[in-house]
Amino acid sequence: MDIKAKLRYAALLSLVLLLSSAVSILADTTKEVSSETGVYYTVKKGDTLWDLSQKFSDDPFTWPDLWSKNGQLSNPHLIYPGQKIKLIRRSDIDKYGASGEGQASSVDDSGAMEGTDAVAKAEPQSYYYSKIERAGFMKKEPIHPHGTVFKLKGTDQLMLGAGDIIYIEGDQEMPLVIGARYVTYRTFTPKEMTARLLDVDRKKLNRVRDEIGTLHYLSGVVEIIGEKDGFFIARITDSYRSIKLNDKIMPYKKRSRHIPIREGLSSMEGEILIAEEGETTFGQDMVGFINRGTRDGIIKGQVYSVYYYEKKVSDNLIKGKSLMVPVTIGNILVIDTQEETSTVLVTYSTQGLSPGDYFKASK
């Protein structure tokens, strides 16, 4: 081998060694990172959200929170090596994002590192809820609809989805606008909702029965594309649930999926009214309603603890009389507000929440 060939070989060998070293360093940096909020982790073979929640939050049951913070994961049971997911802690909700103490540097979407102080100033801590636009609301009196779905195009089916065409009878007092988007919804009266609660403690239900209002249950979004013979033609752009005949419409207003975390009012006390889907009990990642609203000082993003009173006998009292002891069973996050009521998301629960359970500011 001549001297030039030897030099080329040596240069090539050096380049290979340099690249190998760089790949090794890169691999080490993507294996695992700090478990603080805003830091990303690269999924390895065999990882599950359950395991990662146990590893980084010391509680595998917090995996729904990990999923909710990563909207790119369409199925929480299917994650793949190489995917980058954002880590969170249950304490993210408990701290309300007030101080940011103890947090490590975070990684932005481009992979660049940012200091904690800069991140805290630029972006208050928030809860990412990907299904915010489908969350309904409750009002004492139903809102006046802008129109009603009265016909489905060329079919006898009773339920429609995205891409289908519907016909709407507009309200003369509130004319519809071609090109505008509207939310489709249907309403359930207090009587219809309470009729499904057969297994609820009747004493608890009676406490809140009169405060249960009309549920506005959102089904999708439509765009008005034309008008003919006094009615309007609309195309379904989003389907949260099946859109049906006689669904009503109201103007569409985009809602942010990032809900800023706020501390609940220290003086606030109230009760759970009912679950959005009408379940007897409901738990983590489910939506419900409370009997406090904007007139009471409730605002979006506030966090509260849910509890009930349990009777316990105490030997320290005369004749073994009983005490009513509060038992905390979960946390709720306010995601939408009306004057008399608010819509809440259950972010954590140890057992099912039900109508009549109490809530107060978290300690």
Image (spheres, rainbow, N blue to C red):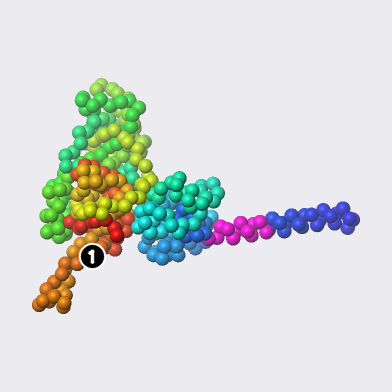
Q: Residue at x 64, y 60 (%)?
A: 24
Q: Residues within 10 Å of mark 1 (few under 14, many from 20)?
A: few
Does residue 183 appear anywhere in the picture? yes
Q: Residue at x 29, y 33 (%)?
A: 251
Q: On the image, numbered disc 1 is attached to which residue?
A: 327
Instruction: Tell whether 332 sits left or right of 105.
Output: left
Does residue 286 appear anywhere in the picture? no
Q: What amino acid is labelled 1 in the image?
A: Val
Q: Please say whether residue 3 is one of the residues in the magenta stretch.
A: no
Number of marks drawn: 1
Above or below, 244 relative to 115: above
Residue 19 is situated, as x and y percent measured from the top left of the image, at 69, 55
Q: Determine which quarter of the picture holds residue 213.
A: top left
- Of residue 122 and residue 158, the one placed in the foreground of this image is 122
Give the overall secondary structure of the magenta segment: helix
Q: Quadrant of the N terminus?
A: bottom right
Residue 254 is situated, as x and y percent measured from the top left of the image, at 35, 38
Q: Residue at x 49, y 55 (%)?
A: 39
- Of residue 77 and residue 17, the one placed in the foreground of this image is 17
Residue 343 is situated, as x and y percent measured from the top left of the image, at 26, 47
Q: Outermost residue toward the top?
A: 229
Q: Determine which quarter of the picture holds residue 26.
A: bottom right
What residue span does the magenta drawing correspond to?
Answer: 21-32
Q: Residue at x 41, y 48 (%)?
A: 124
Q: Secondary structure at mark 1?
A: strand
